[in-house]
Amino acid sequence: MSDLFEGGAAKKKKAAQQSYSAKDIDVLEGLEPVRRRPGMYIGGSDEGAMHHLINEVFDNAMDEAVAGHASRIEVEVLPDNMITIRDNGRGIPVDPHPKFKNKSALEVILTTLHSGGKFSDKNYHTAGGLHGVGVSVVNALAEYLRIEVIRDQTLYVQEYSKGEPTTRLTKHPNVKGRGTTVLFQPDKEIFGAKAKFRPATIYKLIRSKGYLYKGVEIRWSCDASLLEGIKDVPEQETIHFPGGLTDFLNRELEGRNTIIPDIFAGEAELPDGHGKVEWAMAWPIDQEGQVSSYCNTIPTPLGGTHDNGMRAAISRGMKSFGEMMNNKKVGLITADDILGGAVVVLSVFIHDPQFQGQTKDKLVSNSATRLVENAIRDPFDHFLSGNPDNANKLLNYIILRVEERMRRRQEKDVARKAATQRLRLPGKLADCTQQNAKGTEIFLVEGDSAGGSAKQARDRATQAILPLRGKILNVASATSDKIRANQEISDMILALGCGSGSHFDESALRYEKVIIMTDADVDGAHIASLLMTFFYQEMSQLISGGHLYLAQPPLYRITQSNKTYYAQDDAEKDNMVEKLSKGKGKVEVGRFKGLGEMTPAQLKETTMNPEKRVLLRAMIPSEETEDTETRVQQLMGKKPELRFAFIKEQTELYGQNITNALDV
């Protein structure tokens, strides 16, 4: 009875389970797996993956060149999405295959996966195409393919479509030359009717291959109709770079200044005939770096074990040199600090490389790490010791990158804490209750005593108080390590929440106004100057955005009868006393030794109440009126002689009083 109540979907599922048998097992033969799942072999079925077909054919030609059997490769881009690749190598074998006696070796290679002459080292000591699937995959995914082989003064020709031969292998005797020519057109059923070869992409590919093997000459040709609107791609060109990777690097660095003038380049044979390593690297000032690595001329955009070996050699060599120079920060250096802003090209030629996937984006041969590291380490040590001046420049540049990385990490931690862990704000901070930054302000107050009065005087909804202990660090004359280690600076950055330096984010600022509130005396002015120097150097956008202000607390309290007046300086005090003396009652003058001596009510009335107070907004002068950077370095920088020159200049202008004031 239960069957009567089963739904239709359940019945179908049950029937399918019962009928599943051996006849349901598909066996894909020949090249059918490639056509069913092209992504497994070339990474997809889009236009980008279609260009990988060119890699497979071109890499076979390059393998012939690297093995010493070819000196020339020709690439011709034709209309109708067709391309021809020709080499003057030995030519693919065409004699009958011993395992498939009714097929030529040429047909076996083109129609059978995992066939080829690169599985042993008898024919190719180093080669890029090792899976035996390259040209057969191209054949499987080509609507039309024509292959020509010249061997022993005989031309052999055969045509294919979608992996299947459409003609027999024909012979044409008395033909001079030798080599292999492959002409193919990708299948529109696989890649779509709109997919087209991009001449610029192909041209860039073959130029990079020309750099990788300086013994080969590449002849480029492209139909003029395909180049309309495309710049920097010629119709015809002979590509040959006798300098190899150094030529490539010089072209990349054209018009760019470098940290040191020398390029670190070289090549080394690997021991026991394992192959060869070539490299070239430089450090541009703009730090727009890139690392390009290759194995047997195959691009490895994801790097791999050869890249790891190179990075280890450079990192250990630089650390060793830094230790020899007694630089205490070399222990913090990482490979990214050294190579992150460098332009690097690494090319290895090794026997039987192991790649990650058929697209060969990453080298995974375990032995490559040790081989490459050993090959590069000694030359890099000689490069550094051969020119200590340049080596020191490079080391100093790298240490600056280390310091910048450490600062970014600290700022990231600060930003994270400010955004997600409000309870972990500085313990001394009395934060305001309003969440929105608009209309809020934070007072940076000199000393805990003044901070206590300010906390009582504030409007808790919109005013935050951060007491600072004494004079903060002078950032203009301090190292980045000292700046990062300074607790008061860390507290300010954490409280403001907007980061600092190159990572300052105005939109993350937690308060609309940042108000420096110090005593109205010389010491207070000095502390305010140190704070403004910090904001100018580390958060200049906070100033230019109109967020930084200076409070104007009074220095004197003047009373007459029951009335109280306040004066900010001696001149205002003297003027006020003179006026009050003409009236009735005794005039009494009291001097505040600091903000801490003011009662909360007095501090609120004179300095913190937005309706009564006076604020000075900090501004960066325009270049026409003053070179601000020069002035900051003159007054706050590491060179005391600049300050002495300034004092002398001001003394000549204003007399001895300026010197006395500065001495105080």
Image: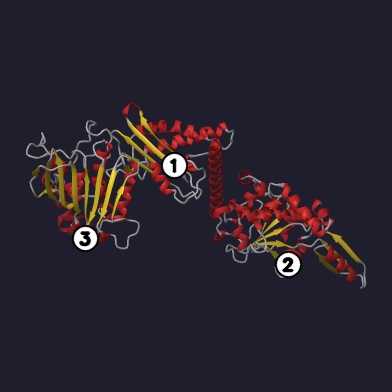
609 sits to left or right of 224: right
- Which circle's residue, 3 or 2, is located before the other in the chain? 3
Residues under numbered marks 2 and 1 in contact, where contact means CB atoms less than 8 Å apart: no
Name which residue type carries label 3.
Answer: Ala
In front: 481, or 351? 351
* Amino acid at circle 2: Val
| Secondary-structure class at tag 1 | strand
- Which percent across, then down, holds residue 107? 13, 42
* Corner quadrant of residue 200: bottom left
Q: Gap between marks 1 and 3, in whole Å?
A: 42 Å
Q: Position of residue 85 (x, y in %)?
A: 22, 48
Residue receiving disc 2 = 614
Label annotation for residue 443: none
Residue 457 visible (yes or no): yes
**Mark sitting earlier along the chain (2/1):** 1
Residue 292: give x, y in percent of width and height: 38, 44
The residue drawn where x is 71% and y is 65% is 615
Q: Distance between the residues labelled 3 and 2?
A: 73 Å
Residue 226 as seen in the image, left or right of residue 485: left
Whether pointer 1 and pointer 3 mark residues with C-beta atoms closer than 8 Å, the reply is: no
Tell me the residue that label 1 is attached to. Answer: 281
Residue nearest the viewer, comparing 3 with 9: 9
Q: Which of 287 and 76 is in front in this view?
A: 76
Q: Name the residue under label 3.
A: 193
Which of label 1 and label 3 is nearer to you? 1
Q: What is the distance, in whole Å, between disc 2 and disc 1 at their CAs?
A: 58 Å
| Vertical arrangement, residue 454 with respect to residue 405, above or below | below
Pick whichever of labels 1 and 3 is earlier in the sequence: 3
